[in-house]
Amino acid sequence: MSWDALDIKGLHLVKSWSFAVGKALTGDAPDTDAIQLAGRACVVESQILNGATLGRSVADAAGLPYLTFDPGSEEFLAILNAIDKPTVVHLEQGPWQTDFHKVASQWKGQIPEPVQAQLKRIQTVQSVLMDALKNQPLVYLTTTKEISTFSAPLQQVGGFDRQISLDGPVQELSGALWLARLGDCVAPSLQDARVKVAGLMAETELDREGVILRLKRIASEENRDIELADFIDVLMRGTTEVDASENDSELTQSALHRVAWHEAGHALVTVLDSHGQRYPDYASACRSTAFGGVVVSISDRHEPMTYASLRHDVRVALAGRAAEELVYGSAHVSNGAANDLLAATRKCSWAFSTGGLAPGMDDAARSGSNLAVTLNEDAATLAEVRALVQAFLATEYQHVLGTLHENRGMLDALGQRLMVDRIVDQAEMRVILDVPQGRLG
C-alpha cells in the first residue's frame, strides 16, 4: 500500500509549508525573499506523528532529499559539512534542544564542572546548527511538545521560525500508519476505514504487534488482501476459541449471561440517551481482553466536554451496573461493575473541581453554578466536590435504572443475542433495538 502522510486531513498546513520551501530552494538559485517568507525551520507538534515518517513526506512534497540524525551524536558535524545541496534535515529530539540559560539559572552561585561541560557542549551544537542554517541550503524539521524546549539563541535568530500545532490526535493518519505496517495486502474496504482502524487499535488491549502479524499471516495463508471484516475479526474474536471450549460449563454460562446483559445495558443506554442518533460500533460479550465490551469509534477530532456530554458518558458508564441490578437484584451486582463506577467518579470529580461544570448546568437559571476551580488540596473543598459527585451519580443512576426498566424488552433481546453470537455489530444492533431518532430514554 502506498500513501502520502501529508494527504491526511489536518496536515494541510504542513503540506503547504513543504511546497513553499521546495519552491524557494529549488531552481537555478535560491529565492532569498521566498525562503525568508516560508521559514527554513519548522516545529510540528503532534501526539502521534513519527518524526522520520513526517520528514520523508515533507521532503517528497518539497522535492528535496531527506536526512535524519541526532545533533547530539559525535558525527553530526561531519554529516552537516557533507551536505552540498538543498536538503530537508529531520533533527531528532535530544539534549541539544535545552535552553542552557534556563539550566544555568537553576544553580545559585558556582555551576558544577559537569554541568558547565554539558552546557558548553549544548552551546557548541547549537552554534554549529545555526551556522549550517545560515551558510547552507538546509531546511530543519523536528517534532516536540513545547516550543520552549528549544534554546533561546535558536529562537532569537529565527532558527525555528515556524510552528505548526496539530490539535489532538490525527486519527486518519494514525490509522494509515497501522495499515502501512501490513504492506500491499490492504483491501479498499480497509484502506477507506483508517479512522475506524485508529479508534479500534486505540481501544484494544491486545498486543498490537501481534494483531499486525496475525493479519499478515491470514493474507499469506489465504493468498488474498485483508478486508475490514478480517481486521475486526482478529481484534474481536482473537480468544473466543477458549470461550467455545468451556461452553458446556454451567459456571461459564452463568458468567456469560451476566456479561451479556451488562454490555447490553451499556449499548442500550448509549442509543436511548442519544435519542437514537448514536449506536456503538460493536457490543461484545467475549471473555477475551481485546475490548472492554462496548466499542464506539473515536472521532477524528476532539470536541470540548460539555455538561450534556458529561451526563451522557456517566449514564452509559452506569448502565452496565444498572442492568445487572435489574436482572439479578441490588444484592447481586458484581464487583466487575466497579471499573465503570470508578471511571464515572473520576470524570465527574475532574468536571466539578477543575472543568467548570456542575450539576444543574442544564437549568438556565443556574448556568453559572460552578464558576470556581479547585486549585489546591483543601480538604473542605474536596469534600464538597465529593458530595456533589456522589449526589450526581445517585441521581443519574436512578434515571438509568428507570430507562432500562421501561425498555426491558430491548435489553433482554440484545442480551440474548450476545449469549448466542458473543459479538453484535452496529447493523444488527439497529435491527434489534430499532430506536427511532428523537425517542427519549
Image: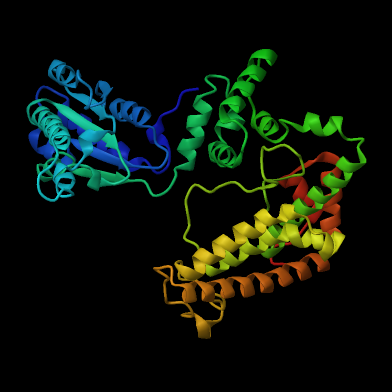
Q: Residue furthest bottom?
A: 365
Residue 215, compared with residue 298, is above or below; it is above
Instruction: Residue 3: give x, y in percent of width and height.
Output: 44, 27
Q: In the rendered image, is residue 441 in sight?
A: no
145 left or right, relative to 161: right
Q: Which residue is drawn at the image coordinates 56% and 71% (left, top)? A: 386
Residue 351 visible (yes or no)? yes
Q: Quadrant of residue 398?
A: bottom right
Residue 326 falls in image quadrant: bottom right
- Residue closer to the observer: 337 or 145: 337
Q: Is residue 438 left or right of residue 366?
A: right
- Compared to residue 263, the image places residue 437 above or below, namely below
User: Could you say which is closer to the camera, residue 76 or residue 202?
Assistant: 76
Q: Residue at x 34, y 31 (%)?
A: 51
- Whole-percent x and y of residue 70? 26, 26
Location of residue 56 by image quarter: top left
Q: How many marks?
A: 0
Residue 354, horizontal then vertical, whole percent? 44, 67
Q: Which residue is found at the position 57% from the left and 75% from the top?
A: 388
Could you tell me which quadrant the C terminus lies in?
bottom right
Q: Who is closer to the viewer here, 40 or 95?
A: 95
Q: Is residue 36 left or right of residue 360?
A: left
Up the image or down, 113 lies above or below 106; here it is above
Q: Position of residue 27 (x, y in %)?
A: 15, 23
